Amino acid sequence: MFPGFGTLVNFLLVLMGSYAGLRGARFINPRLREGVVHGIALFTLLLGANLIRENEPDTLKVFLILLFGTAIGYALDLEGALEKAFRSDRGSVKAFVTSSVLFTVGPMTLLGCILEGTKGDSSLLLSKAAMDGFSSIILASSLGRGVMFSAPFILLFQGSITALAFFFGDFIDPSSMSNSLFIGGGIMILIALKLWGLLQQIKSVNFLIPLILALFL
C-alpha cells in the first residue's frame, strides 16, 4: 500500500455509495426521508458535543483562528460560490457541507491520515472508508446529490493531512489536532441546527477554513 491509499478507497466508496443512494431515493417514502434527516441531525449534534467535551483547546489560538479564518471564508464567499456551482440549489449545498464535515471531522480521520503518512498503515482509514461508504448511501437518499460532491473534498482534505504527516510527521503538534477537533465539534453542532431548519442565515461552508487552518497553526 502507498501513502494515500486509504483516502483513495474512501473517495471511491463515498462516490459509489452516494450514487447508490441517489438511485434508490425514489423508493423511500418522503416522511421516512424527513425522519432520517432529523436522525442525522441528532447524531451530528451528539458527535459535535462529544468532540468539544473530549478536547482541551488553546482558547486564544482557537478564537484567533475562528476570527481570521471565518473572515477569509466570508471574504472568499465560499458558500456563494457553491450555490452558483449548484445553480442556487441550497439543498445540494446543505448536503455537501453536512456530508463533508461528517466524513472528515473526527479522530479517525486525523489519526488515520497520520498513521498512513508516517507508518504506511492504512487500516484505520480503510475501516473509516467502509463506514463512510455505507453512510453515504443513507445521506444521499435523504439529502440529495450534494453528498456525492463531498468525495472530492475527502480526497483533498485527507490527502493534505496524509501528505503533511508523510513529509513533516515529526513536527505535528498534538495541540493543533485538539484545536481542529474542537472547532470541528462546533461546526457539527451548527450543521445539526441547520438541518433542523434553524440559523439558516449563517453560511456554514465559510467555517471550513478555520477547521483546516487549525491543523497547520
Image (cartoon, helix red, strand yellow):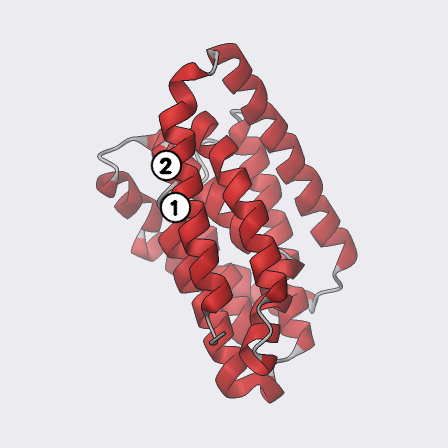
Front position in the image: 50 or 26: 26
- Residue at the location (52% across, 60% down)? 211
Left or right? Give the position of 39 relative to 79. right
Depicted 118 relative to depicted 9: above or below: below
- Residue at the location (40% across, 43% down)? 16
In the image as oriented, which residue stretches furthest toward the front? Answer: 1
Mark 2 to mark 1 CA distance (whole Å): 6 Å
Depicted 169 relative to depicted 212: above or below: below
CB of mark 2 within 8 Å of CB of mark 1?
A: yes
Left or right? Give the position of 86 relative to 172. left
- Residue at the location (66% across, 31% down)? 42
Q: Which mark is residue 19?
A: 2
Element type where label 1 sits in the image: helix
Front position in the image: 186 or 64: 186
Front position in the image: 80 or 1: 1
Q: Quadrant of residue 184?
A: bottom right
Q: Amino acid at mark 2?
A: Tyr
In the rendered image, residue 98, in percent from the top left (x then y), is placed at 49, 40
Q: Amino acid at mark 1?
A: Leu
In the rendered image, residue 118, in percent from the top left (x then y), is placed at 58, 82
**Residue 149 in sight here:** yes
**Residue 180 in sight here:** no
Within 10 angstroms of label 2, few (less than 14), some, or many (20 or more) residues?
many
In the rendered image, residue 204, in percent from the top left (x then y), is placed at 46, 44
Element type where label 2 sits in the image: helix
What residue is pinned by disc 1? 15
